[in-house]
Image: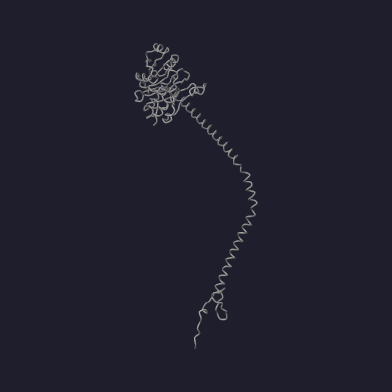
Amino acid sequence: MATKRVLPTERIVLAEDGVGAGHAGSPSRGPSCALSDGKARSGRARDMRRLLSALRRLAALEKSAEVLPELGQRLAALEQSVEPVPELARRMTASAREIGAASARIEGLEHALDEQRRHLQVRTVMDWIAHATVRTAPLVSVVLPTRDRCAWLPRAIASVRAQTYPHWELLIVDDESVDDTPALLAGISGGQLRTFRARGAGVCAARNVALAHARGEIIAYLDDDNVMHPGWLKSVVWGFEQRPEAETLYGAFVVDDTARVLQVDRGDLPRLCFYAYDHKAVAENNIADIGCIAHRAGLAEAHFDESLREMGDWDLFLRLTRDRPPLALPAIACFYTTDAPHRLSNGPTNRAEGATVRARNQR
């Protein structure tokens, strides 16, 4: 029996919707036609998906369009609430000024509170010292230079004699006065008061004369136009007893007229001056008059620069405290007057000497 030969095309079966193709009784279209039909159906499906996606986006846009009027109203409200830029800038500038003024007031209040705290501290310590008993009795040498202030000098001398602490000596150096000062001193010299005659080389040289003759263990100072507080020398001795490691101390002083000191006006009420010590700050501005400074005798820096006419006391204070801070003693040392003649403060050498002292005493 002859074997029937099967053609390759008859062995190809294409699945289409689950129906076999190429079987007997079914017409065969061939593989190329079947592949074309499959591609066409795939393209139609892709188009259908794109159409559905577009319809979904259109529906979302239609939904968004419903809220557009509300968004427009809110935007208009925001535009109305925003102030013009110039007006906003003006209000910001005014607010900045108000903040600056408030900060200045707060700073002023803080300064006033700090000043009141210092005043209370001075009063408290002075009251304590007045009733305290010092355990030692060192001799205190008071250095007082003078020149042509015969009318003022007796008041300064009387303030030393009125001290509650009795162990002192007063060394007065007349720096070639041409008024009645020599006659005045000739009549009062003796006892605890010794007088010397300088060569007219200035207040720093006159103080050095007194330092060379001082016999005390402690050195204090007074200017001829100022008045020493009656409890100052006792306060000095008490302070060094309390702080035996201290070599220098300074106290408070009362200025009769700060406006006159600053040369802006006159007529201010007396003011207490007592400030915390910071060497860097003190090297820029002096905080202690010579009348409120005291130190132990024999210190290497305990001498005055005779080339300085106005700033010798400031220079001395900075040199004495450059390596070791002083004791800030809350007690009044002297009453500082500003109306005496021939004052050295704010004189012609003030600016130049101030620059010299600042430069040499920077740490």
* Image vertical order of residue 254 relative to residue 23, above or below: above
Q: Quadrant of residue 206?
A: top left
Q: Position of residue 204 (x, y in %)?
A: 39, 21
- Left or right? Give the position of 155 relative to 73: left
Q: Quadrant of residue 309?
A: top left
Front position in the image: 168 or 334: 334
* Image vertical order of residue 88 relative to residue 173, above or below: below
- Left or right? Give the position of 51 relative to 224: right
Most extreme residue toward the bottom, as rendered? 1
The mark tally for this picture is 0
Q: Position of residue 300 (x, y in %)?
A: 34, 25
* Image vertical order of residue 66 relative to residue 140, above or below: below
Front position in the image: 179 or 336: 179
Q: Position of residue 4 (x, y in %)?
A: 50, 85
Q: Position of residue 299 (x, y in %)?
A: 35, 25
Pick the quarter of the image with the C terminus.
top left
